[in-house]
Image (spheres, grey):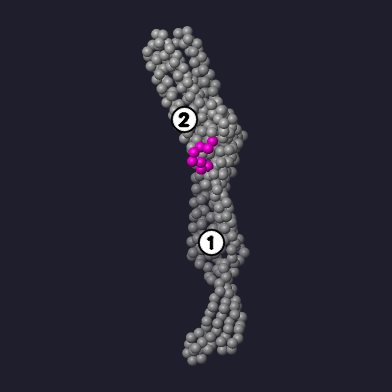
Amino acid sequence: MRPSSRLLLIFVSASLQAATESPLTLTDALARVQAGHPFLRTRDAESRLAAARSASAAARPPAEISLQLENALGTGALSAARSLETTLQLSRALDLADRRSARATVATARNDAELLAWEERRRELHAEAACRFIRVVAAQAALATARDAAALARRTTDAVTAQARAHGALPADTARARLALAEATLESEHAEHLLLSARHSLASLWGAPTPDFAHAIADLTTLPAAAPYETLVVRLNATPATARYAALTRWRDAQERLARREAERGEVRWSAGLRRVETTDNFGFVFGLGYAFPNRAAGAAHASEARAERDRTVAEGEAALHAVRATLFSLYQELGHARAAHATARDELIPVATAWLTALDAGLTAGRYHARDQLEAQAALLSARRRQITAAADYHATLVELEHLLAAPASS
């Protein structure tokens, strides 16, 4: 499941929308990561490696050729190689079908486990790219908010300064307004740095030394609903991570079966060739069979090793499932908190702060309020906007992590 299915992208500040370059969508970002990240270019090498393992498992033992010289040296009638017998012989071990099948099973199980591990890493990179993309969009919104804050502070400072010149404002109000302007300007500069860092972090995933996109566009204000926790927990039993541990277990089982078969059966060899007898200058055909007894001690040791590796893999898989279940619960709680924070900022904090600032603007003109009241209301409104941006970004980033954990949509 690619995280792009959960994020339909259409959000960016007005100033960034004016950029002439096409905006970067999450789909574009994931495509660039797929094409540019060094690890994702190893898929072909992984396929060739798997094919090489399968070919090695299916390969038959090599043939051997030997030359034997009998009666080459001796005394009497055997001296001077007069009774020399020369044998040229070809030999090979019999590779039975069940042994080849056992080797092929080992190679296949290992290939399956490593393919699943590669897919896990690919999905992890895509999830990381989605999270970095979300951080870029959130940083853009935060920068727009910071610039709004600086503009409001500048207007308030200008108004208070004008009142001071007309002897209608207190010196404390003027100092407070200038302090607010300096802080807002510094905050805006800091937001620019955070956005630049987020853009560099995202572009580095596809190998770009500097960001090669103007801005990112996404709708962070729409929060897709997730299925109930009880439903998501059940899905953990069918994740690729669970399948990978199952493939590793099959690999160790296959190794154990192969080791026990090697311990139980020896190796049959055949040989055939020609023999030349020096005394008669004749040739003869020779044929032989041999049997190498199995090394039971080594076979049993290899089988025990494979069994121990299997038991360890099973235990690690169970431990991983427990850890993932705990992580799922934590992410689900964070998802609920982010949704609640976003709704509170949208439905309560921002409307109330907006109404407060509107009332102050009208009263300030009539001389009923001081500039410090307006600055306080502005700070409350901007804080509420930042809360909404942060909560929306946290929700989408948590949803990406949740879906990466499940390797499936988290919706019902």
Instruction: Quote the CA–CA distance across marks 1 and 2.
Output: 62 Å
Q: Position of residue 275 (x, y in %)?
A: 58, 82
Q: Which mark is residue 187?
A: none
Q: Position of residue 381 (x, y in %)?
A: 49, 20
Near mark 1 (Cα within 10 A), the count class, few <14, some 14-19 or many ≥20, is many
Looking at the image, which residue is at 48% across and 37% down?
200
Residue 178 visible in the snapshot: yes
Front in this rendered view, residue 61 or 13: 13
At label 1, the amino acid type is Ala
Res. 213 image quadrant:
top right
Front in this rendered view, residue 241 or 364: 364
Looking at the image, the residue that sits furthest to the front is 20
Looking at the image, the residue that sits furthest to the bottom is 76
* Residue 300 on the magenta span: no
Identify the residue under disc 2. 192
- Image quarter of the C terminus: top right
Q: Describe the element under mark 1 as helix, strand or loop.
A: helix
At label 2, the amino acid type is Glu
Q: Looking at the picture, does residue 84 appear above or below residue 118?
A: below
Q: Which mark is residue 259?
A: 1
Looking at the image, which residue is at 37% across and 13% down?
171
Front in this rendered view, residue 228 or 201: 201
